[in-house]
Image (cartoon, rainbow, N blue to C red):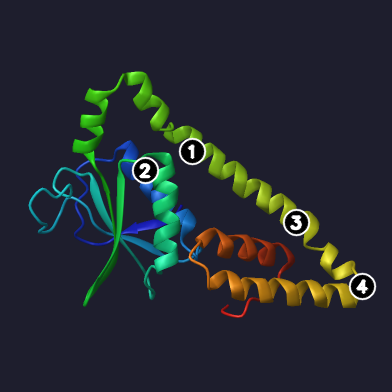
Amino acid sequence: MNIQVKKGVEIKCINTQLITVCHVVYGLSRQGDGQVFLTSASDGLHGEGSYHPEGNAWDFDKLNDNFTRKEALCIKLTLKAISPFYDIVLEKEKDNHHLHIEWDRRRAEKHKNNRSTKAVQIQTKPLREGITMSNTFKAIIRIVASVIGPILRLVTARFREELIEWVQKEYGEALETENPWDDFLFETIAGMFKIPLNNQ
């Protein structure tokens, strides 16, 4: 994971929520090898009731690029799957385009008071488990890519061309859907077979 902290940013605490957020934001940014910045944490001026001052809200941006709507949706769905107490907003202010993420501590505490501790533990997956699953998935993708990728060079030219044409066509249609996982599926397939995509 390679997230840089912008100069002047103050981090009040490094908690489980921040580590989870950084892991997901970096892992699900389309340009996974690009630069992601933490641009605000406990510092700065924020609205009344903001979670920034207490260290439970963070803003992210990317170098030479902005988070896309689909990237934000993908990050939102993933964090919400880990815990319903994350709130994610893609803010498009004139000179301050960024991804705002917060851990809704008040809602989490209210939920804890209304339910048993066991129920809360079921809702919130352990961070270590999430990281392990993510690392395992990435390792599997790398192994599959190393095995299957070279096969494309060995198959008959006609089948190779048809596969490339199919992936590029389906990826174009996936970009038109609201579901970010459609894009991810064909980007993964293209990466395995080293197939150039239309927007890359």
Q: Earlier in the sequence, mark 4 or mark 3?
A: 3
Q: Which residue is located at x 22 percent, y 52 percent?
A: 41
**Cβ atoms at labels 1 and 3 below 8 Å apart:** no
Task: Kindly report which numbered mark, 4 or 3, lies closer to the viewer in this rendering.
Answer: 4
The residue that disc 2 covers is 19
Q: Disc number at residue 146?
A: 3
Q: Neighbour class for label 2 at 10 Å: few (<14), some, many (≥20)? A: few
Amino acid at the residue labelled 1: Gly
- Identify the residue position indicated by label 1 in the image: 130
Circle 1 or circle 3, nearest the eye: 1
Relative image position of residue 149 (x, y in whole percent): 77, 62
Q: Amino acid at mark 4?
A: Thr
Query: For the residue carrying disc 4, how many other residues have a C-alpha within 10 Å: few (<14), some (14-19), or many (20+)?
Result: few
Q: CA distance from mark 4 to mark 1?
A: 40 Å
Label 4, label 2: how far apart the Cα atoms are: 46 Å
**Residue 32, image x, y percentages:** 50, 62
| Residue drawn where x is 22% and y is 24% of the image | 113
Q: Which residue is mark 4?
A: 156
Residue type beneath disc 2:
Ile
Q: Which amino acid, mark 3? A: Ser
Q: Label 3's element?
A: helix
Q: Residues within 10 Å of mark 3 (few under 14, many from 20)?
A: few
Q: Secondary structure at mark 2?
A: helix
Of marks 4 and 2, the one in the foreground = 4
Disc number placed over residue 6 in the picture, else none: none
Q: Using the numbered discs, state the Cα–Cα distance from disc 2 to disc 3 in whole angstroms.
A: 30 Å
Task: Say above or below: 108 vs 93.
Answer: above
Work out whether residue 92 or residue 54 is closer to the camera in this orientation and state it. 92
Where does the image place residue 118, in percent across and percent down from the top left? 37, 19
Q: Position of residue 87 (x, y in %)?
A: 29, 49
Determine whether the residue tagged by mark 4 lies in a helix, strand or loop.
Answer: loop
Q: Earlier in the sequence, mark 4 or mark 2?
A: 2
